[in-house]
Image (cartoon, helix red, strand yellow):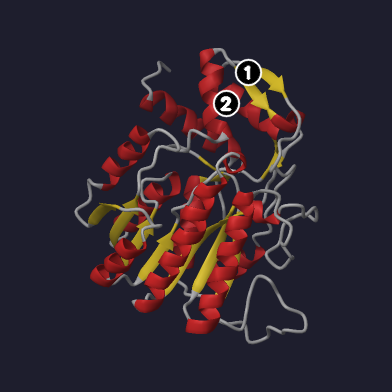
Amino acid sequence: MKILVTGAAGFIGCQLGLKLLERGDEVVGIDNLNDYYDVNLKLARLNRLRQHERFKFIRMDIADRSSIEQFFVQEQFQRVIHLAAQAGVRYSLINPHAYMESNIVGFINILEGCRHNKVEHLVYASSSSVYGANTKMPFSVHDNVDHPVSLYAASKKANELMAHSYSHLYKLPTTGLRFFTVYGPWGRPDMSLFQFTRNILAGKPIDVFNYGNHRRDFTYIDDIVEGIIRVVGKPAEGNSNWSGDYPDPGTSRAPYRVYNIGCHRPVHLLTFIETLEQCLGKKAIKNMLPLQDGDVPDTYADVGDLVEDLDYAPATLLEEGIRNFVLWYKDYYRIAP
């Protein structure tokens, strides 16, 4: 198939693009290569994709309406995987406009491109952050998620609502994927595993929020990519049993679905740090801090729907995943084993 991957220079976008190319798809990637984090890391990811002759990259901002319109008309994609977004919970506290431009304006441009160019299926990145103030565990796509605790989370919930309206009005099959704390080689420098590794190796303290009492459903990158690929191959369909009297948030009469993609095994943050210390062979200096604004104490994914519908089976153990990241980190930054 001819597939568009937005955010192709990103952590998930690059790994996904490589897997699609490996199985024989034609992949077009776009990314604006902004400086939210190290652009050189993004370029290094792109270089991996450019080794394949069936990959084409175009530097483009999804918030640029006219460019996106022309691009969709010119390329005529069969499937679209929309991963480009302004990421990060804490950054949304200091730069909210970046989230509106990328996550809201950018998303409507992608929806319009799909609508007007007969795209067969739009798969887009949502986030576990949408569960916000929910405390019932594990988090289920069939639960209400109307109480976000960060603007980032609100923008992702808005994406789900926008997608549903297009599925309803224009019969565009859309599937939203709520990612749960993705980690692994080639990851984002603003995420905890990257920051912890960098500081521990440098002998600097690491900031441990909520005094280490967080639990996170850490999900390895390969398991995320496998889940996305399974979803792309099955366009969303309407749920004939859906009722407006008892509306199910995860499905619809329209061709619309939402899935959690997680490991279904939440881990305490201190356990996560201990595992990293073992892989590095070095102890962390911990700076214990309270819960930060916008953060949720725990995440825990109910992936039952994805298992039932697509036989999804996350298989990577935390120890293996962290070990793989450490090996990559030392190799990429030329640090002696």
Q: Residues within 10 Å of mark 1 (few under 14, many from 20)?
A: many
Q: Which image quadrant: the C terminus?
A: top left
- Residue 188 in percent (x, y) is at 48, 37
Closer to us: 257 or 295: 295
Q: Which residue is mark 1?
A: 284
Q: Quadrant of residue 117?
A: bottom left
- Kindly identify which residue carries mark 2: 196
The answer to whether the residue labelled 1 contacts the one labelled 2, judged by CB atoms less than 8 Å apart, is yes
SS of the residue at dot 1? loop
Residue at image x 55%, y 63%? Answer: 159
* Residue sitting at the far front: 97
Tell me what residue is drawn at x 32 percent, y 64 percent: 66
Q: Is residue 152 above or below residue 70?
A: above
Q: Tell which residue pokes out farthest to the left in this image.
A: 53
Q: Residue furthest bottom?
A: 240
Give the amino acid at mark 2: Phe
Q: Mark 2: which secondary structure?
A: helix
Q: Position of residue 21 (x, y in %)?
A: 30, 56
The kind of residue on which mark 1 rests is Ala
Query: Who is closer to the viewer here, 79 or 108?
Result: 108
In screen coordinates, is 336 left or right of 169? left
